[in-house]
Image (tube, grey):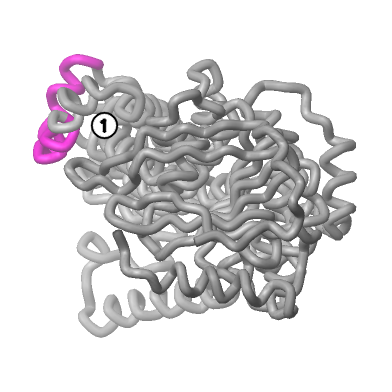
């Protein structure tokens, strides 16, 4: 707990040193205390806009993860889906999602929907790819054992999927979710930059236009805090989902 | 070349007849057609070199591979070389896995009783990662017994254990599986001599099944005891014969 605080303090000191040494004007690089002051004075605005961005990130993460998980299960279940969809999904990653942002704003409007879709598109692939990989790599011995236990009866296959394949793929899914949590803010903020009426990205553009660099920095820090909170929440959820991977192996 | 049975009583009729059509991986035939009759409460060991088709034969009997004339998948329980315990489930839940997969009401009391009998009463709520290799294999044995099937297929189940734990596990398996038919695949002649009633050899290209020796004494037995040594010699001689 102490180490991140010491690192943070070191970075703030370095920031102050750069401002002092190079005598930078506040509209280029405001000193840390000016940003802290903007944080306090405009706290209500930052909180309102951060709530919008956080909601976009959370909803994008939830829907993107759901869509990714459904795609992974669909790919596992259907050979036709693998043949037709897998190449399309992989090729789709060659298109920069940011290039789609103006289109998404056009189709889904200036509200939250376009940002949520943007975050979803970014989140979908890491979740789908990691979960599908996890589902494919189930230990063959477990599947053999399950087949013997169920005498290969098709009516029990859904239980093998739920109790073995999905459980075995959970660590891979958790890794995908962590990557998704790290990229979710990118989707939300890019969407806000292209066209929005609220959110931290929108606030940053507004502050930039008014040369309120201290407020821009404050919004940036608020965004970083949102991203860290989201990552920490997903990390915590992963630990809850995978208790057998924790340091302590005894349940009680 | 078969060691004569010390008892001259006629063999009881087989309780289970296994007839296999053989098996090929693509163009490569690994297993020749086979006929294997199992008597009630009999433990049959199949010996053979690594990669010689032993696991293929066992998988065919288990229904994991096609080619058995009359499938017996619903009568078998399976114990593999790895314990195959699910790392996310407690030991108790691992033992109940079969019932859970079949959507049956699990008999928790029986599972706990089996675990107590196997010396795992303190570990029922633990994850498999907390257990030693021997304890994990005991849990796998409990899971196999929990299935309550007449035929138990064992694919080198103790080969990954140290010598002392292996001997203890062999003794335990003999005690707990004495009411079932057991088909044990192993590459260890001493293990076959210790627990099997009959030893078969699976060798050749494609692998053919042929009898080597019968034992008419209770198991587990000391493979170095004078009564067992001739059988052990016979097995070693059979293993060194040129492959057909």
Q: Up-down: is A240 above or below B109?
A: below
Using residue A143 as the reference point, say whether residue A122 is left or right of it: left
Using residue A19 as the reference point, say whether residue A159 is left or right of it: right
User: Residue A209's x, y, as percent?
Assistant: 19, 43
| Chain name for mark 1 | A
State which quadrant residue A193 falls in.
top left
State which quadrant residue A65 falls in.
top left
The residue lying at 53 percent from left, 73 percent from top is A5
Tell me the quadrant of the picture where the C terminus of chain B can be found.
bottom left
Q: Up-down: is A193 above or below B44?
A: above
User: Residue A185's x, y, as percent?
Assistant: 34, 43
Residue A96 within the segment the image draws in magenta: yes
Residue assigned mark 1: A121
Residue at the bottom extreme, as displayed:
A21
Q: Is the magenta stretch mostly helix, strand or loop?
A: helix
Q: Answer yes or no: is residue A147 visible.
A: yes
Q: Give the range drawn in magenta.
A: A89-108
């Amino acid at each position: 707990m102490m180490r991140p605080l010491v690192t943070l303090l070191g970075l703030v000191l370095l920031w102050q040193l750069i401002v002092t040494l190079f005598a930078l004007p506040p509209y280029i690089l405001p000193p840390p205390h000016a940003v802290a002051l903007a944080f306090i004075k405009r706290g209500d605005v930052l909180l309102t806009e951060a709530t919008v961005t956080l909601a976009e990130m959370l909803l994008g993460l939830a829907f993107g993860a759901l869509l990714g998980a459904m795609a992974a299960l669909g790919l596992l279940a259907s050979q036709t889906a693998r043949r037709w969809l897998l190449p399309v999904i992989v090729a789709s990653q060659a298109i920069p999602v940011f290039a789609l942002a103006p289109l998404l704003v056009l189709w889904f409007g200036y509200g939250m929907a376009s940002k949520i879709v943007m975050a979803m598109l970014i989140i979908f692939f890491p979740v789908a790819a990691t979960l599908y990989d996890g589902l494919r790599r189930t230990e063959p011995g477990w599947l053999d054992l399950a087949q013997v236990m169920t005498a290969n009866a098709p009516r029990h296959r859904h239980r093998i999927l739920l109790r073995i394949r999905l459980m075995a793929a959970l660590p891979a899914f958790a890794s995908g979710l962590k990557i998704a949590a790290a990229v979710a803010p990118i989707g939300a903020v890019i969407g806000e930059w292209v066209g929005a009426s609220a959110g931290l990205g929108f606030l940053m553009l507004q502050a930039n236009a008014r040369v309120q660099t201290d407020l821009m920095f404050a919004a940036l820090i608020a965004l970083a805090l949102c991203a860290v909170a989201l990552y920490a929440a997903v990390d915590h959820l992963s630990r809850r989902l995978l208790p057998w991977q924790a340091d302590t192996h005894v349940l009680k | 070349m078969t060691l004569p049975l010390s008892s001259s009583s006629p063999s009881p009729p087989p309780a289970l007849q296994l007839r296999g059509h053989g098996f090929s991986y693509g163009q490569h035939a690994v297993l020749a057609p086979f006929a294997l009759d199992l008597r009630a409460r009999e433990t049959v060991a199949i010996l053979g070199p690594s990669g010689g088709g032993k696991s293929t034969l066992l998988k065919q009997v288990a229904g994991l591979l096609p080619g058995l004339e009359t499938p017996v998948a619903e009568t078998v329980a399976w114990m593999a070389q790895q314990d195959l315990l699910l790392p996310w489930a407690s030991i108790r839940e691992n033992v109940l896995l079969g019932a859970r997969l079949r959507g049956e009401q699990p008999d928790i009391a029986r599972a706990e009783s089996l675990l107590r009998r196997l010396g795992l009463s303190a570990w029922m709520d633990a994850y498999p990662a907390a257990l030693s290799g021997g304890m994990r294999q005991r849990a796998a044995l409990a899971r196999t017994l929990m299935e309550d099937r007449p035929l138990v297929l064992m694919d080198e189940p103790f080969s990954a254990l140290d010598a002392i734990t292996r001997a203890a596990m062999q003794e335990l398996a003999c005690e707990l599986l004495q009411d079932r038919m057991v088909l044990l695949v192993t590459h260890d002649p001493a293990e076959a001599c210790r627990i099997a009633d009959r030893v078969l050899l699976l060798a050749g290209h494609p692998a053919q099944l042929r009898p080597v020796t019968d034992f008419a004494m209770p198991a587990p037995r000391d493979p170095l005891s004078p009564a067992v040594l001739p059988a052990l010699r016979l097995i070693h001689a059979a293993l060194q014969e040129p492959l057909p």
